[in-house]
Amino acid sequence: MNERGRPKRDPRDPAQDSPLSAAVGLRDREVMAMVRRAVDRKDVLLAFQPVIQVARPERPAFYEGLIRLLDETGRIIPAKDFIETIETNEIGRIIDCLALDMGLNSLKRDPSLRLSINMSARSIAYPRWMRILRNGVKGDRTIAERLILEITESSAMVMPDIVSVFMNDLQSEGISFALDDFGAGYTSFRYLREFYFDILKIDGQFIRGIADSPDNQVLTQALLSIAHHFDMFAVAESVENASDAAWLSGIGIDCMQGYYYGAPTVVPPWRMPQAAKRA
């Protein structure tokens, strides 16, 4: 299998030159071209989604900054439509750089903001990404203390030893880390013990409809127990209705994120008029 979970191509096997294989290859090339054009036009932006702490629901614990692209027509393209295709390519590192730069600029502009930004473990060794991080936190320690870096479970497992050292170095400077999409991949519990993530985000596949799913209830309770055992705040992703939110609150989940609390918006929610009225 390759890094995207697809079978590796064997040039000796004519069956792999199938119409489906050709269509997948064409789609990937089109996605790559779309991303490159958007980057060249500087049509890259962040959308912000609140993460709500159950104990203090009156205001978000932090926001997640989600990368978005604009196509030639101005249509907003969410990360799920392109991130898997570019993950192992240098354009993926460039997207990580742009997301980090925009996130750091948001933190500089709004001293009360706490923000999480997604990254791939592959960007750790990308010099431009590290320069942006160092320059962004230089001169204002509060920026590092308000920054959360989210690494997906599958990405962390590509190079767990490097991720562990990287996290240890930056946590000493005040930066926090979240393990994203937990439960969707194949985390070794040995590495989970050694990573010391600050936040564990439970994958939405276990959360959607959880109030009516005994199987997902058992699995989520187990994941929550793991998070609390390792002193991590647990965030339930993809909370979409009141019954799911109530059930999760009842088992002691720390934070929730999803459309029930707010959809991602490219207009910073803390700058909206209603936010000013509540402040």
Image: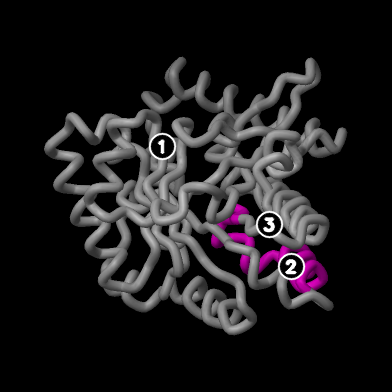
On screen, residue 30 versus residue 212, left or right, reads: right
Which mark's residue is nearer the viewer, 2 or 3?
Answer: 3
Q: Nearer the N terminus, badge 2 or badge 1?
A: 2
Which is nearer the eye, 103 or 69? 103
x and y, in percent, of residue 122 in the image? 58, 60
Q: Is residue 134 magenta?
A: yes
Q: Which residue is mark 2?
A: 133
Is 98 left, or right, of 121 in this rendering?
right
The first of marks 3 and 1 along the sequence is: 3
The residue at the point 63 percent across, 59 percent down is 114
In this image, 255 relative to 27: left or right? left
Amino acid carrying label 2: it is Leu
Most foreground residue, 268 or 70: 268
Q: Which residues are magenta?
A: 116-137
Neighbours of disc 1 within 10 Å: few (<14), some (14-19), many (20+): many
What amino acid is at disc 1?
Answer: Ser
Q: Residue at x 14, y 39 (%)?
A: 215
The first of marks 2 and 3 along the sequence is 3
Q: Is residue 123 above or below residue 2?
A: below
Q: Which residue is mark 3?
A: 113
User: Which mark lies nearer to you, 3 or 1?
Assistant: 3
| Whole-number angstrom distance, CA of label 2 to CA of label 3 | 17 Å
Relative to the observer, which residue lies in front, 20 or 96?
Answer: 96
Q: Secondary structure at mark 2?
A: helix
Residue, disc 1: 238
